[in-house]
Image (cartoon, rainbow, N blue to C red):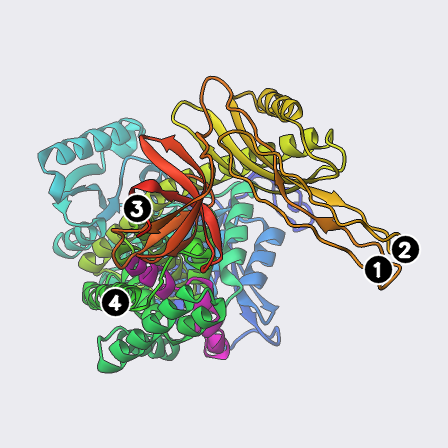
Amino acid sequence: MTNRRNDERHGRSPGCYRVLAAVGTEHDLAPLLHTAGAIADARDGEVRVLTVTRSGNAPSWLTIPDADVGGAVKTEAVTRAGDNPSATILAESRDYDPDLLILGLHSGLQQGRYLLGRTLDPVIQGATCDVIVQRGRIKPESDRVLIPAAGGPNAPEALPIARALAPEAQITALYVANARLGRPEVLVGESRLATMVQRLNPEDRQVVDTKVVAAATPVEGILTEAHGGGYGLVMLGAGREGPVDRFLFGDIPQVVLDQSTIPVMVVRPHLSHLSSFWRRLWARIFGFVAPLTVQEQADVQRVIPRGSQPTPDFFITLTLAAALATLGLLMDNFTTVIGAMLVAPLMTAVLGMGLSVVLGDLRLLWRAAATTVRGILLAVAMGYIVGHVVPGAGPNATILTMSRPSILDLAVALLAGAAAAYALSRKEVSATLVGVAIAAAFTPPLVTVGLGLALGDLGMALGAALMFLANLVAIIATSGLVFLWVGFRPHPGDPDRDRARRRGFLITGVLVVVIAVPLLTLTQQSLSEARFRRSIEQALTAELAQVPGGELVRWEHALTPEGTLNLDVTIRAAESVSHHRAQGLQEAIAVHLDRPVALSLTTVPTQQLHAFVPPTPTLTPTLTPTGVPTETPTPTPTQTPTSTATPTVTPTVTPIPTITPVPSATPTATPWLLTVVDVGRTGLRVRYSPEGVVMGQLDEGTAVVVLAGPVLVDDVAWYRISAPGAYIDGWVDGTYLAPAP
């Protein structure tokens, strides 16, 4: 260590090598004293033994026998008061400024989020000096020491400590090759070990052997070699895995410490202040929530498998929920849809898939997945059946919402999955699980898939399926991370479950990315369409400001394959718009949008009437150009019961000639009567514009009045019609119209 500002205050000579041994129990005292004394003696250093008690009084067993530390090593024992042992040890480390901190591990590892325990983990993460975690007493007469190595700096740094503890021992540097990769991986290991040995000084090279073994996992290879090779000590370097990797997949030293039957020592090289800061920050982020107890984890593992079973109750509730959701969608009643979300039982099965990924439990995964697939098929079938049974079924705002997913829906599902897993694992907040189920529901998108298939709208079905998949994958991913956060882990050292967990996290991450790509594309398209509509509306508003009393009522647009923008615009105006002015509006809008425009303009003139001035009954004329249908108004006498001026609106149609290069319409001379034919049970869809958004549908045999058309789009003739009995005014495909009988 370079920081020696406290040396003079503590009566130490500059450069003195200092070892701090944190002893928690009598069982740890002798092994840690032996290790601390051997290392300090080899480097002419000193030892401080630290114990932490609530009162600050030294325990009765805290004695320092000379035989354990050597007569040449200065040794002192101190006791500090503190309720938090890890914080007290770190405070002592900052004050004493040791070169090496030694910690003892004398019991089995805790199941949960902590790698080495509630006390050891914060100390290892926060200490800025070298750290050793030791389990078992190292015998000086040990003749063989095993140091697993991957070619990094850990093995060379552990070598001097091994030689100090067992001066006569032969040291073996071990590389564990992946057995599935075969001979090439073995050659890589031999090359890495040879390079590492070349970096050692000549004295150390003489006592170091190298060995490469093939195994399914590094843990399996290390333990097999350690137990079968007659070794007296295993030394491992910590820090190869980053905090995220350890959080997801555990730590190799953790498993070796837990399962080795011979003494194990884990050496973590000193950290910079910056590295220590990030490690402490990571620990604070994921450590402020207490992990679940063994009993709490057992309760969750009983609830989730039970909810993942395809029981009769599951199918009954899902059937009712799917039917309720379908009717709510057809009624455009989102309250009914929410009721279906509350009843649907799919959430627990999906959470089971997330938990199975964390535990590496393939049986739970297949059970939950099978239940989820059955639920999917049932919900889609129910939507299909109800879509055929209910007359006049068609798209509406709520259905369209379920069939148009965006990246925001994925974000909602990610947050909902995290909230659902946390609510399920915590009894005190489990009541909020119902609300979470509403945030990212499965049933409405699934029944929308069925509705789309029933209506023959493949785009609707695919959009709803994409929304469901986004919800499914996102909830599996984030629920798994939360289960990790609260302490769920597979048993250390189970290679099959460890491999299953790694594959599960990898596949889930890939699926999230795959789902995000089309959602980003759809979101971009939606934003582009919104910007385009906004530019059209801005252009219309700006140009109509030049019309006296001009007010935009409604507008629809459609793009032809040639790129011409067809605009169907209705405005209110104080006076009729002349043909010349309409042409000017068309040209101005085209310049504003920088694209060809074909404008169809309908004006509704407004008239102010004064209560004290009786009007003369007049007939408001309608400008009727050749080929354009007109609405013929009737004279409207106005009486004056009050002093409030009342405007009377009389619609007129202002014809707009078709511009070059693309005509907007070939108008009809007068309205005529036709009948809807050959549409079957699905009906004829009425749209706001040719190939635009559907506003409703007409049954076969419905009489309609043709107002305008035909307009050719992709060789299909579109007509603007009015169905007086259905109160619908829009555009339809002329293929399904025939003269009325």
448 is within the stretch colored magenta: yes
Q: Residues within 10 Å of mark 3 (few under 14, many from 20)?
A: some
Q: Which mark is residue 612?
A: 2
Where on the picture, by quarter, is residue 76? bottom right
Callouts 4 and 1 close, C-beta under 8 Å: no
Q: From this view, report whether residue 160 is shown above or below residue 229.
A: above
693 is within the stretch colored magenta: no
Question: Between residues 410 and 149, which one lies in front from this camera angle?
Answer: 410
* N-term-proximal mark, 3 vs 2: 2
In three-dimensional space, the C-alpha distance between marks 4 and 1, rounded to whole angstroms, equals 58 Å
Q: Amino acid at mark 3?
A: Ala
Q: Secondary structure at mark 4?
A: helix
In three-dimensional space, the C-alpha distance between marks 3 and 4, rounded to whole angstroms, equals 31 Å
* N-term-proximal mark, 4 vs 2: 4
| Region in magenta | 423-451
Q: Is residue 450 left or right of residue 632?
A: left
Q: Which mark is residue 513?
A: none
Which residue matches tag 4? Answer: 385
Which residue matches tag 3? Answer: 738
Camera-near label (3 vs 4) is 3
* N-term-proximal mark, 3 vs 4: 4
Q: Is residue 606 left or right of residue 387?
A: right
